[in-house]
Amino acid sequence: MKPHIHDILKLGKEILEIPSPTGYSEKIIPYLISKLNNLPYEYEVTPKGNLLIHLEGNDTSKHVALSAHTDTLGLMVRSIQSNGTLKVTTLGGIIVPTLDGEYCHVITRDNKLISGTILYKSPSSHVYKDANSGVREVDNMIIRLDEVVKSKQDVEALGIQNGDIIAIDPKTQITPSGFIKSRFLDDKISVAILLALLEYAHKTNQKPVFNTTFIISTYEEVGHGTAWIPSSITEMIAVDMGCIGEDLACTEYDVSICAKDSSGPYDRDMITSLKSMAVKKSLNHVLDIYPMYGSDVSAALRGGANIKGALIGPGVMASHGMERTHGDAVEATFELLKSYLNLG
Ligand SMILES: [Zn+2]
C-alpha cells in the first residue's frame, strides 16, 4: 500500500476511536477542527452542528460541495431496570444481533464514561434455555454496567439517566494485508479521505477548480444530515460507503459510483463524468444500484436544495455490522475526488 493511503487509514483509525453516535458530536467536531488549525481554510460550525470548510476555487463562478458524515450508529438508554441493567433504543439502523457481547460506554449528561457490555437478556447458557435461540432484537438486549450496581438507585447514583448516549467499541484494526476493519467505517473512513484531500490541496499549493465546501455532517444516520446547505451550492457529491453484496458489482477494492438508491436516481451528467474520470485514471471502480440506502445528497434534495447530486465511496463489506474495506478502495475514492476537484 502506498504510504499516503496508509496514512489515511491511520487517520481513519484516530477518527474512529472518538465516539460520535448520531446526536453526540461534542468530541469529534473539536477534534476535526484541531486538524484544520494547521490548514489555511476558513471553517464554520452550523447551528445544528455540521462542520463546513470553505476552499476558494480557481473559478469562483460556481460553488460545489463534498460531504461525509461523522455521526455513527449507536444506542441510547431507554430505561434503568430494578436489577441495575439498562434497556436501550437504537440510534440509526444497526444490525442488532452483531451487538451481542460488544463492549460499550454510557456517556452521562455530565460527560462521565461508564463502561459496560451489551448482552442478550438471557445471557448464560448454564441458566437459560434460549441463550442460543433467543431473538437478538433491541427490546431483548440489555447493558451490564461495569460498576457495583444492584438497583435502579445505584445506577442513578452514577449519574446515568434515560436518554444518555451509548457508544459501541468500534474495535478498529489495520491489518498488514491492507484492510481496515472496524464498526463505523460508514462514514468515518470518508471523513478521513476528505481531511486527506484538504491536506493534499494545501501541501501541493493547489486550489480546486470551483469554490468548494467540504461538509462534515452530524445527523446523516437519521436521515437529515445535510437537509440544509448554503444556497450558493449547485452541485454536491456525498462521499459515503459503497454497498457490497447480492446483485452488486462493488468489492472492498473499488470506489463505487451509485446510479440510484432508495431516494431515486442520482444526476446523470455527474455520474457520466465521474465514470469517465475513473476510466481515464484506470481506477478500480463500479457503477451500482443500492437497494436500501439514502445519502446526504438525498437529504439536501429533500430539504429543498437546488443541486445536481452524486454519491460515491469506498466499498464497505458488512455495513452497519462488523465492517471492512481495503486501502485500494480508499485510494480509488481519493483519486476520483482529486479528479473531480481537478487537483493534479
Ligand atoms: Zn453512511
Image (spheres, rainbow, N blue to C red):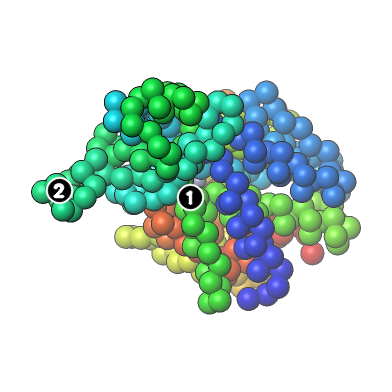
Q: Residue at x 56, y 76 (%)?
A: 176
Tell me the tag on residue 169. 1
Residue 197: horizontal and vertical position, in percent? Answer: 73, 56
Q: Name the quarter where the N terminus is drawn.
A: bottom right
To which quarter of the image does residue 139 belong?
top left
Q: Residue at x 87, y 46 (%)?
A: 40
Q: Amino acid at mark 2?
A: Val
Residue 61: horizontal and vertical position, in percent? Answer: 82, 39
96 sits to left or right of 294 = left
Q: CA distance from mark 1 to mark 2?
A: 27 Å
State the residue in front, 316 or 211: 316
Q: Is residue 172 above or below residue 110?
A: below
Quick one: which residue is furthest to the left in this view? 129
Mark 2 C-beta to ligand 1 under 8 Å: no
Tell me the tag on residue 76. none
Instruction: Report how many numbered discs are placed on residues in the image.
Output: 2
